[in-house]
């Protein structure tokens, strides 16, 4: 409705702009000024005659001529406008009143969309961007790289997108080109190894293992390469070696490392113990303990953790450590009970619940 009100006001303004000059007609051009001039001339003639500057017959003749001109000027300004002028004005007014709205509506209806809501420019730009599918954008980048095959930045952008789309063979080629034209780095070698593993259905092939080895040679702390080298050892039946690689990763990892739960789950899978980190004093004391005493100490620590989580159940990492500890100790029932308690404790927080479920899934507790 507001749109039509705006259109009506705009049309009225346009019509007014046309009719205003037409309504004023022909203005008298200099009527007042001509009359003043002729009257002044009559007064001047009378003054000259009274002073004897001109004789009476000449003064009478001058008065007659000036009066004739004054009457002629008055007749011209009183004359009505010509019929053709009146008809032109009426035609122009008719066009303004009827023609302008009709022409405007005739143009708007086939081209406009009065029923659509407001669509600001910023939203139009976003809609245009979103309308272009990911596959279309990838095709454009591929075409660009076909014409510019040495564009290393283009290959580095394209490679992970191809991997995400499941085009693994193309992703391998893109990662290789990225290394060729951007130079070696531990991240690029590790990424290439990872996509080789994905292309092999999760098996760390000899080629992939070679890439991970190159990544470690460039950066001994390359997380992705270290994890997959541990996975390669596990797949080759060398569980102890895999556990050693993953323990070393956890020992150097920050507490909030996003991959910590994945590595801990892998460590549990090969029979390792990702028990909560102990202080240096505790570790020193544990070295001199018997296996029975050491196990009792670990159970005491687990019980303390369980007690703390009952008081503060929002610690997702704490719940995951507790579940892992029960699994390592062989208490599968307690592990499942702890996972249920954890879900109830964080049920009101969707983000914590998501993190918890992902961690439990990595531990093999999907239910």
Image (spheres, rainbow, N blue to C red):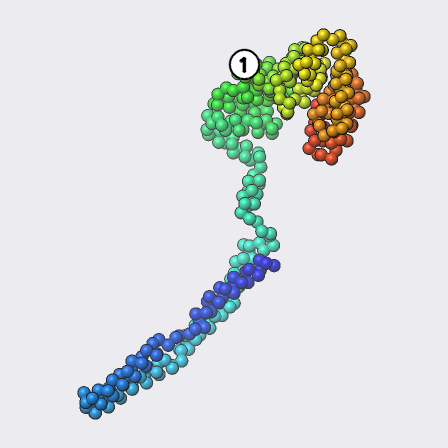
Give coordinates of residue 5: x percent, y percent.
57, 61
- Front in this rendered view, residue 142 or 334: 334
Left/right of residue 334 with respect to residue 65 in the rendered view: right
Q: Which residue is at 64% across, 23% downward?
A: 255
Task: Residue under label 1, please give it.
Answer: 217
Where is residue 216, by image quadrant?
top right
Give coordinates of residue 193: x percent, y percent.
58, 19
- Could you tell me if residue 306 is visible in this image? yes
Q: Which residue is at 52% across, 61% downward?
A: 10
In this rendering, the answer to whether 132 lies above or below 235 is below
Q: Which residue is at 36% across, 80% downward?
A: 77
Left/right of residue 305 with respect to residue 203 in the rendered view: right
Left/right of residue 146 with respect to residue 161 in the rendered view: left
Where is residue 358, by image quadrant?
top right
Where is residue 200, by image quadrant?
top right
In this rendering, the answer to whether 54 lies above or below 137 is below
> Image quadrant for the N terminus?
bottom right
């Amino acid at each position: 409705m507001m749109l039509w009100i705006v259109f009506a006001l705009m049309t009225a303004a346009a019509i007014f702009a046309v009719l205003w000059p037409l309504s004023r007609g022909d203005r008298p051009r200099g009527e007042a000024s001509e009359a003043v001039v002729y009257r002044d001339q009559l007064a001047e003639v009378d003054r000259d005659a009274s002073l004897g500057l001109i004789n009476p017959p000449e003064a009478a003749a001058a008065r007659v001529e000036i009066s004739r001109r004054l009457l002629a000027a008055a007749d011209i300004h009183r004359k009505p406008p010509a019929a053709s002028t009146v008809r032109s004005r009426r035609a122009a007014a008719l066009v303004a009143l009827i023609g302008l709205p009709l022409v405007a509506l005739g143009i708007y209806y086939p081209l406009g969309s009065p029923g659509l809501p407001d669509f600001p420019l910023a939203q139009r730009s976003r809609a245009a961007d979103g309308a272009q599918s990911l596959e279309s954008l990838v095709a454009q980048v591929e075409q660009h790289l076909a014409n510019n095959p040495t564009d290393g930045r283009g290959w580095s952008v394209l490679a992970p997108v191809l991997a995400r789309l499941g085009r693994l063979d193309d992703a391998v080629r893109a990662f290789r080109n990225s290394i060729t034209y951007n130079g070696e780095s531990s991240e690029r070698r590790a990424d290439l190894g990872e996509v080789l593993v994905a292309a092999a259905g999760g098996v760390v092939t000899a080629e992939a293992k070679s890439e991970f080895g190159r990544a470690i040679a460039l950066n001994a702390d390359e997380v992705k390469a270290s994890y997959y080298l541990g996975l390669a050892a596990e797949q080759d039946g060398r569980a102890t070696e895999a556990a050693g690689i993953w323990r070393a990763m956890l020992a150097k990892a920050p507490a909030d490392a996003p991959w910590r739960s994945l590595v801990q789950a892998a460590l549990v899978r090969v029979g390792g113990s990702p028990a909560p980190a102990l202080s240096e004093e505790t570790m020193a004391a544990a070295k001199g303990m018997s296996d029975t005493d050491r196990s009792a100490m670990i159970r005491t620590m687990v019980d303390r953790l369980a007690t703390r989580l009952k008081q503060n159940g929002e610690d997702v990492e704490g719940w995951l450590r507790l579940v892992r500890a029960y699994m390592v100790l062989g208490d599968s029932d307690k592990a499942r009970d702890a996972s249920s308690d954890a879900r109830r404790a964080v049920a009101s927080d969707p983000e914590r619940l998501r993190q918890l479920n992902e961690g439990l899934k990595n531990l093999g507790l999907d239910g």
